[in-house]
Every structure is written in C-alpha cells, then in structure tokens.
C-alpha cells in the first residue's frame, strides 16, 4: 500500500541491474495481461510495465463487462472477426482460470422501420464475421425472452454467444496466473523512450522514470498511450484520441429486470448505449460516446448520465432508475484520422522485434484472445522462441469465503478465524479474504486494486461501511500509517493522518 | 443448530430496546446480534449529547445512551453476541406447531470470527438493522471520482472512533441534523468547514444553533452540489442554487475549493436481510410492508427502528423497538393480536406519541431571524431559541427580565443564562496511550462558557489516557484550571482488549 513497495513485488523485491528480459510488455490492461499470461507458460523472462498502480487501470476498469456477439463491426474486418473468434475462445480461458462466464445471449432491438434497417445491416455484418446462430425475432418473440422489454420493439436479432464476464476478475486472474509463473509487474512505471537494438546494444532499451529496461522483444499494448509508445520507434501515421463512455450501475435484483444483454438500434445520437446484467448480479447501463481532450478525463456529466437513463428507459420502460449505486466513465482509444467505414483494430510490427496494438477500443476485451495470437505471431516471426516450461505453477481464481461450500468454509476458518469477520457487508467479503489477497502473487497496492480483486466498496454502500475498517486492517498488516494508503495513485490519499 | 424463540438482528437502540422488552414480556430465549465490536449500533460513534431526553429525562451522549441499554439488557439476562453478522435469512423447512396451528420458523446464518459460519433457528425475528447512508452514487452527482468523498456517518466513525483525520478543507452536502452535527465536530477538531449546503432548511433548530450558528460556519440553503472535481483527491466542488423543483440554476454556479466532501443527504433502509428472506422464498423484490408499525406481511417477522421509518430522535427509535419486542412476545405466546389493523396501529402509535414530542425543525423564517445582524429587535426584546430539547421553543426576554414563549421552567433558566453568560456542554474525544487507532468519548461535567470551549477542546487534544477506562470517570480534572470544577468525564468503559 506504500509507494516504496511499488514495483518490488513479483521479483521478490530485487530488481537486477543488467537483466535482459526476453519480452517487455508495455501496458498492463486486458491485452497486456493476457499476453503475459500466455507467454508465462514458456521458458521466458517477462516483465509488464504499467504506468498505473495496478493492472487493468485503463479501459479494463470501465467497460460494459460483456463479450460481444460480433455484429457491430464491419463485416470481415479484423475487429469483426476477432470479436467472433475471441468470444469463442473465452470458454476455455474462463475454465482454465476458474472465473465466471455467463452466456446469457443478447438481443439487438429495433424500435422503428429505420431501426430495422440498421438492425438488418448488423445482422449481415454478423453473418460476414461468422457470428454463430443469430436469429431474427419479432417484437413478440423478443418480449417472450425479455418480458419487460418495451412494447415499441418491433424486431430484434438474438445472438446466443453474447456473454457476461467481469473485466476485473479476468484481468486480475490472468495477471495473478502470470505472476505465479514468474512474470514481473512494475507499477507506476511510465515509458518515456525506447531505443531499438543497434550498435550500442543488441537489445531494446526502454526508458522509464527510474531506470532503463533491456528486452529482446517488446509488445506495446499501452491502450490510449500505444500510439505515443510506438512513436518512439517509428513515424506515427495514426492519430488516437480519447473517447469517453459513461456508465451507471444499478442494484435491483437484476434477474427480476433483465436476463439478456440488450443492444438497441439507436435513433439520432443514442450510439451504442446498452443495458446488461453483470456477473455480480447488478445491471450496467451505458456507455455514452463523447470525444474528450485527455485520456485522464474520466469525469461523468449530468448530460451523459441523463442520456444513459433515457436509453435504459427506452429499452425497458419500467427500468428501476432509482436503484443506481454508482456511475463512472471509461476512455476508449479511438483512431480519428481514418474514415469510420475504413477504421479497424490495428495490430502491426512497429519495428523488427516489436509489435503494437493500436486503436483497440470496444469490443477489445472480446477480441483480446484473438489479438493476442496475432501479436505473438509477429514476435515469433521475428525470432522469439516459445518453448513450453516443463512445470507450470497451477493457478485458479479464488472465490470469496462466504461463497464457498460449508466444508471449505470450515477448513479455512479453522486455519484463520479472521475468515469469520465480515468487513464488507454488501459484497460479503471477510477479513480472511482481504488477508488472502494481500498475500497473493500480485497483491494490490491501492484501495482500487483491492476493489478490483474483492469488490470491496462496490456494493450498495459504496464503501461507506467498509473502507475505513479495511484501512484499519491494512495499517496493521502493512505496518503503515493511514495516510499512506492510497485510493488509486500518488496524491489520492484517503485520510490526512491521525486526529490525536 | 441452536434454537431460539426470538432473534433480534441489530444491537442498536431499536434492537436493544426490543430485546429488553421481549424479555420483560416473558420471552426467555432471546438472542441479540450486533455486527460491531460493541453493542449499540451507531450510538458509540455519536459522541454528541441530546440523546434520551424523553426516555431518560436527561440529555446524554450516544455512548452513554448505549451503555444504559447494555446495562439493562445484561440485567435482564439477554444473550447477546457482538462482532457477528447475519448474512442470510430463510424460512425453515420445519414448521413449529402451536396450539393455534402451524407457524413457520426462520433459519439465520451467523458469521463471526469466534464461531465461523453457523446456523440458528428462530420462531420469530425482529429486524432492527437501521439504515445506510445515501451515497454520492445514489445521488448521481457527476464529476470525477477522487478520494475524499465520504458520507457523514463514515467520517463520524473515522473521526470519533478510529482517530482518523479525513481532510482539512471541507464542504458538507446536507443541512439535516447529521450534516449540522458533523460540521461542528469537524470545526471542533480544527478542520475548516468551508460550507454546509442543502436544498432546503431542515434539521432541528437546536442543532442549527449549537452546531452552525454558535461557530459561525457558513451555511446555504437552496443549494446543491453540481459536480465533483479532482483526479486523485478532491480539489473542489461546483455548487449552484436550485429552483423550487430542485433543478439547479446553472448561471448561479460557483466552484468551492476543498479536499473533502461530506455527504449527509439522507438514509436508506438496510433491508438486505429482508431481501434475502424474500429471495429464498421466491418473492424477490417484494418490499417490507408494515401496516402497524412493527408487524409485517410475514408472520413472525417484525421490524423496528430506522429500518422501517426514519425517526428524528433516539427516543422514538427506542419506543419503536420496545413495541416490536412486545408484539413479538405476544406472537410467541400465541396471544391473539389486536384484531383490526386500525386498532393495532393505534396501540403502536400511542407508544410513539408518548415518546415523541413537538419538534422544532428549521424554517426559512427562523433562518432569516438567526442570520440577521442584530438579535435584539426594536422594542428592546431579546429573542432566542431554547436548545434544551427538540421542541426548540422560540422565547422572548423582556427588558424587565421576564421570559415568554417557553414551555417549561428549564427554558426560562436557559433563556436568562443564554443572555448573560452563554455556555455549552462540550463533547469530544481523548486519545489512548499505545492505541492510536482508538479514542475515548468524553463530555464536560457541566456547561462550559461558550468563549472557553476552545480551551477545553485543546486540553482534550493534548491529553492521552491509559486503558482501562471506566465509564463516568474523570479523565481531566478542572479542565479550565480555574477552580470552576468542570471535569472531562468518560462516556463509556474501555478495556485493553478493545
């Protein structure tokens, strides 16, 4: 929880000066973590450089939490194909990691003849992208699947492959699995330059605030910063700008409201706003789509939130708007110098030995498994040998204590009675869960890191019961002062210190 | 599985009163469950005074009021557990047979460090779990999401129990009692309260006077927070006036720099346990329906305190708990309940009315008077509000010294003393040697002259005491050091283990 401890984790606290990594991954989002996890099964020295104080601090932290069906992107584009292919690859990924995946299916609904036209265009895109088993439904049929759906819905496309997944659980599970198998993670580590292999050194030399890191290969999955990172090694022909999406989280008994992901053929400026259940039993509504100035610009606005509410009510007229628990905004990396109809995800070789992923906005999480393969393909072509390790440290994502079976609970509690001390009531997290996470292969440095791993503070009370009680445990366990505990990064202290 | 006649969920003022009342009405096997380390619910963190005016006939602090009920429940022989959460509630598959036929019973899941996860069965349940606070998310305040945005109860716990300083420059959204009380608390602890704002005047007049007016804390009614700023820590909030319909008037907006935003904008029932009961029986989403104050649509399931209705004073909460205990006892003894719903309602209301009294809530009229420069009006009359009890009588002192407008003799005494030498009871905390993470709540043994309150607060800030501390012991003798014999007295007992 303390600045001094940043970047000292997975390497056992020692950073070796002249170490040369086989692969340095710049950016610890979903794509970066997935590549790290995939490569961690090979005999390679790996490091992930992340500017935030945790994995998944960018787009991973604020997206819809769904696997898209593959009918949004242009037919036959990399985005379209990687969505369909990536989506299908998640069954194995989730099973391997032991994380929840709910294949609820989705409805893409249309309210007007014009909307039906849009819908049919999506359907055709879906066909070209290979989206499986889509069905065109009448309004009636759609309402049979989703009883509270607006009576104004006249047609819908049903996609059975659409799924719910927690981006938080996904990114932490992959990163923890990677860390368990020796991948180093450096946080608060912003890349300020890259020297390509040449006369001075046969390796890439990556400059960060504190030091230079040498690596044989570089993977650039820096999300919003990917274009700037690539610019260190080649001329940049893409302009990537931040686009903000605002969301609401609602907390009714979700199953009583909706069962599927609901996309809509937007009229006017309604964009891709959707509503969906979450794996945690909430409902998410959003996003908006607004160009903003900075990738840090994650403010929500009254207009944006009103828009989300309006669309949610349009899809489900009886939508329980008053059960909102929180709102937030995420930033997607949007390529702006290419026409909309030509725009696509860009996976390319930046220079020999370095691959970049650019403009990976939604549905980037869905596409990630496929994009991972593409990126690995590039660096393999450039000579990276991926020889499997003889022995892997097995990893399974752990469920919180109170969701376990009675027998498992008894066993854990007997070993550590603190498993019986409930810290977070809304999400049912106990002190034992917290201690386990602090002792995990990739322990959180910030309160938001804890939130990602345990959902502490994400429930109805938004942390007003648990946060200061969690701080008490952290002060004790980490032997730190309360003012050293951060919410997110430097400067986001939770308290000023002791009163007396 | 342990079996009880009655399990009460929540050991705050409602739950404790319900337990004592059920016991005194003849129910033997009662279990009272509290999730905190200490019995009392939210009372231990409410270190200010003004509790128990009706029930005890005197004004005590939150911790003292809790101690009173802890003592009574111990005397009555109620079994109680602390540091224990009820995480699930469902109907038992087994029905209990009585001479009036079959009644369902309940299964509770209890989680604690001491016993792990265990189940208990109860023939009746009283839910006394109180409220949560409305959060920034529920209020849908847009802006960034920095640290430093807290709810009032949360900062209250941090400051009064955990010895934490949340920030230095504070804006408080919410001008109800909780917001006003926290404004004073923060001011007294040396923080700068830049503004208290709320959409309309609310809260008891006595709290307004003691907390805001006394300490010249800026307050604005008819305002709301439009947006929150700051990437890491709060750097400021934008506020704006609202029109009659609560819509902000953007042209009047203004940014106020601060490092902390406290949200004191209302409460929502903590009814998760009810929801878990409904979900377990396939009735997800059904709200608690209480027609007669404490009974519900589920036989054997009773509610009391703030989980069912937000009360203004702890006395009313106590009364509600007392009534729930009585009703649960009647149910368990198989007595016929009062037949007509109307009658039940009347019986319950009687109790409440006995406990409550007229309450003087802030109005715009009061505000206009209180914020005017000169409290003495043209005829030489001296106008003031009594702060002794929630009635908040508006009184007048004539030139000859006679007092009018008061409804009791205490009021008259207060009026004279307020005019000549205003004084206040001081409630604060004292640190503990070797335990920086805890504080002892204390109060002054008698009222301190208003202009010397700061000296008392400073003395308390400097002092650290050793554990154990026994309730009502003098922790600082003659705190003003002038022989006036005002002492600082502990409001609760603390042992080394806590």
Image (cartoon, rainbow, N blue to C red):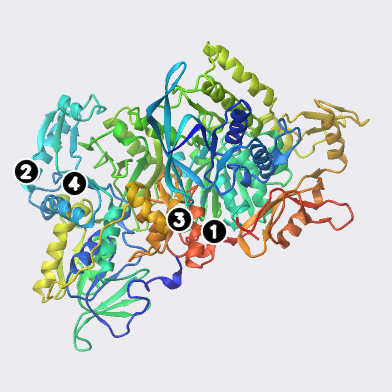
Residue A127: assigned label: 2
Q: Quadrant of the C terminus of chain A?
A: bottom right
The chain ID associated with circle 2 is: A
The chain ID associated with circle 4 is: A
In screen coordinates, is A409 left or right of B148? left
Within 10 Å of disc 4 (Cα), the crowding (few <14, some 14-19, many 20+) is many
Residue B106 at x, y percent in the picture: 43, 31
Label whose residue precedes the other's in the sequence (2 or 4) = 4
Q: Residue at x 79, y 38 (%)?
A: B374
Label whose residue precedes the other's in the sequence (1 or 4) = 4
Which residue lies under the disc numbered 1? Answer: A495
Asked if residue B378 can be seen in this view, the reply is no
For the residues marked 3 and 2, what is the alpha-carbon distance in whole angstroms?
53 Å
Q: Residue at x 54, y 56 (%)?
A: B259
Total count of labels: 4
In screen coordinates, is B175 left or right of A434? right
**CB under 8 Å between discs 3 and 4:** no
Which residue lies under the disc numbered 3? Answer: A418
Residue A68: assigned label: 4
Which of the 4 quarters of the picture holds residue A203? Answer: bottom left
Q: Depth check: A318 or B222 in front?
A: A318
Q: Are marks 2 and 1 on the same chain?
A: yes
Asked which secondary structure carries label 4, the reply is loop
Q: Are marks 3 and 4 on the same chain?
A: yes
**CB under 8 Å between discs 1 and 4:** no
Q: Quadrant of the N terminus of chain A?
A: bottom left
For the residues marked 3 and 4, what is the alpha-carbon distance in whole angstroms?
40 Å
Mark 3 or 4, closer to the camera: 3
For the residues marked 1 and 4, what is the alpha-carbon distance in whole angstroms?
40 Å
Residue A273 at x, y percent in the picture: 27, 41
Label whose residue precedes the other's in the sequence (1 or 3) = 3
């Amino acid at each position: 929880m303390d600045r001094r401890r940043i970047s000292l984790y997975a390497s056992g606290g020692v950073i070796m000066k002249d170490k040369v990594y086989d692969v340095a991954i710049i950016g610890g989002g979903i794509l970066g973590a997935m590549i790290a996890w995939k490569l961690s099964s090979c005999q390679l020295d790996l490091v992930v450089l992340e500017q935030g104080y945790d994995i998944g601090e960018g787009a991973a932290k604020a997206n819809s939490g769904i696997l898209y069906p593959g009918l949004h992107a242009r037919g036959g584009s990399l985005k379209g194909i990687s969505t369909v292919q990536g989506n299908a690859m998640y069954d194995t990924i989730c099973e391997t990691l032991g994380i929840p995946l709910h294949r609820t299916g989705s409805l893409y609904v249309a309210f007007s003849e014009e909307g039906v036209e849009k819908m049919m265009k999506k359907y055709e895109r879906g066909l070209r992208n290979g989206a499986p088993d889509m069905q065109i439904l009448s309004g009636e049929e759609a309402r049979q699947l989703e009883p509270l759906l607006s009576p104004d819905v006249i047609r819908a496309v049903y996609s059975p492959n659409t799924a719910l997944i927690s981006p938080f659980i996904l990114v932490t599970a992959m990163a923890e699995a990677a860390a368990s198998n020796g991948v180093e993670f450096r946080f608060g580590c912003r890349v300020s330059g890259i020297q390509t292999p040449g006369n001075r050194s046969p390796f890439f030399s990556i400059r960060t605030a504190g030091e230079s890191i040498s690596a044989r290969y570089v993977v650039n999955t820096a999300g919003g910063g990917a274009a700037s990172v690539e610019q260190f090694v080649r001329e940049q022909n893409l302009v990537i700008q931040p686009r903000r999406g605002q969301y609401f989280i609602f907390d009714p008994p979700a199953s009583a409201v909706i069962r599927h992901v609901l996309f809509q053929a937007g009229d006017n400026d309604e964009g891709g706003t959707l509503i969906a259940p979450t794996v945690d039993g909430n409902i998410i509504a959003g996003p908006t789509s607004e160009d903003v100035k900075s990738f840090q610009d994650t403010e929500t606005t009254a207009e944006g939130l009103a828009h989300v509410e309006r669309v949610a009510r349009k899809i489900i007229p009886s939508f329980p708007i008053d059960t909102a628990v929180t709102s937030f905004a995420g930033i997607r990396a949007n390529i702006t110098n290419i026409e909309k109809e030509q725009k696509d995800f860009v996976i390319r070789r930046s220079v020999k030995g370095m691959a970049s992923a650019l403009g990976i906005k939604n549905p980037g999480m869905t596409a990630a498994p496929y994009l991972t393969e593409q990126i690995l393909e590039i660096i393999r072509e450039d000579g990276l040998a991926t020889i499997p390790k003889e022995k892997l440290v097995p990893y399974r994502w752990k469920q919180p204590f109170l969701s376990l079976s009675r027998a498992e609970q008894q066993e854990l509690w007997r070993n550590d009675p603190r498993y019986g001390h409930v810290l977070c009531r809304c999400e049912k997290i106990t002190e034992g869960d917290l201690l386990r996470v602090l002792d995990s292969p990739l322990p959180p440095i910030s309160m938001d890191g804890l939130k990602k791993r345990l959902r502490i503070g994400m429930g109805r009370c938004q942390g007003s019961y648990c946060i200061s009680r969690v701080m008490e445990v952290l002060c004790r366990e980490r032997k730190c002062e309360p003012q050293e505990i951060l919410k997110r990064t430097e400067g986001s202290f939770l308290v000023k210190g002791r009163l007396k | 599985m342990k079996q009880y006649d009655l399990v009460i969920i929540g050991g705050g003022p409602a739950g404790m009163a319900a337990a004592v009342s059920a016991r005194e009405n003849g129910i033997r096997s009662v279990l009272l469950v509290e999730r905190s380390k200490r019995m009392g619910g939210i009372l231990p963190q409410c270190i200010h005074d003004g509790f128990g005016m009706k029930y005890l006939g005197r004004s005590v602090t939150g911790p003292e009021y809790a101690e009173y009920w802890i003592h009574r429940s111990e005397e009555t022989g109620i079994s109680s557990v602390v540091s224990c959460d009820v995480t699930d509630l469902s109907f038992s598959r087994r029905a209990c047979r009585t001479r009036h036929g079959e009644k369902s019973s309940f299964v509770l899941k209890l989680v604690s460090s001491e016993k792990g996860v265990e189940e208990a069965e109860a023939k009746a349940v009283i839910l006394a779990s109180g409220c949560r606070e409305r959060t920034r998310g529920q209020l849908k305040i847009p802006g960034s999401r920095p640290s430093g945005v807290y709810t009032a109860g949360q900062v209250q716990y941090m400051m009064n129990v955990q010895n934490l300083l949340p920030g230095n420059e504070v804006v408080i959204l919410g001008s109800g009692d909780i917001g006003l009380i926290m404004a004073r608390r923060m001011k007294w602890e040396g923080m700068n309260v830049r503004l208290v704002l709320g959409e309309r005047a609310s809260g008891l007049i006595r709290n307004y006077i003691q907390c805001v007016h006394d300490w010249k804390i800026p307050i604005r009614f008819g305002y709301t927070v439009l947006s929150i700023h700051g990437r890491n820590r709060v750097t400021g909030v934008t506020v704006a006036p609202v029109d009659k319909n609560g819509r902000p008037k953007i042209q009047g907006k203004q940014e106020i720099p601060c490092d902390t935003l406290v949200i004191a904008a209302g409460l929502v029932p903590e009814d998760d346990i009810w929801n878990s009961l409904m979900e377990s029986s396939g009735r997800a989403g059904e709200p608690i329906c209480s027609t007669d104050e404490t009974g519900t649509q589920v036989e054997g399931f009773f509610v009391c305190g703030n989980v069912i209705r937000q009360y203004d004073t702890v006395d009313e909460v106590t009364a509600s708990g007392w009534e729930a205990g009585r009703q649960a006892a009647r149910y368990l003894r198989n007595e016929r309940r009062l037949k007509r719903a109307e009658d039940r309602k009347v019986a319950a209301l009687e109790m409440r009315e006995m406990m409550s009294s007229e309450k003087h809530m802030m109005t715009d009229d009061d505000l206009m008077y209180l914020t005017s420069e000169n409290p003495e009006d043209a005829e030489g009359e001296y106008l003031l509000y009594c702060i002794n009890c929630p009635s908040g009588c508006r009184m007048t002192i004539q030139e000859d010294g006679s007092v009018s407008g008061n409804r009791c003799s205490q009021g008259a005494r207060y009026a004279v003393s307020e005019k000549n030498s205003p004084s206040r009871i001081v409630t604060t905390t004292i640190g503990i040697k070797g335990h920086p993470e805890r504080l002892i709540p204390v109060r002054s043994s008698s009222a301190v002259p208003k202009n010397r309150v700061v000296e008392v607060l400073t003395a308390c800030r400097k002092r650290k005491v050793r554990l154990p501390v026994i309730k009502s012991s003098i922790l600082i003798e003659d705190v003003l050091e002038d022989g006036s014999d005002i002492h600082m007295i502990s409001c609760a007992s603390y042992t080394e283990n806590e």
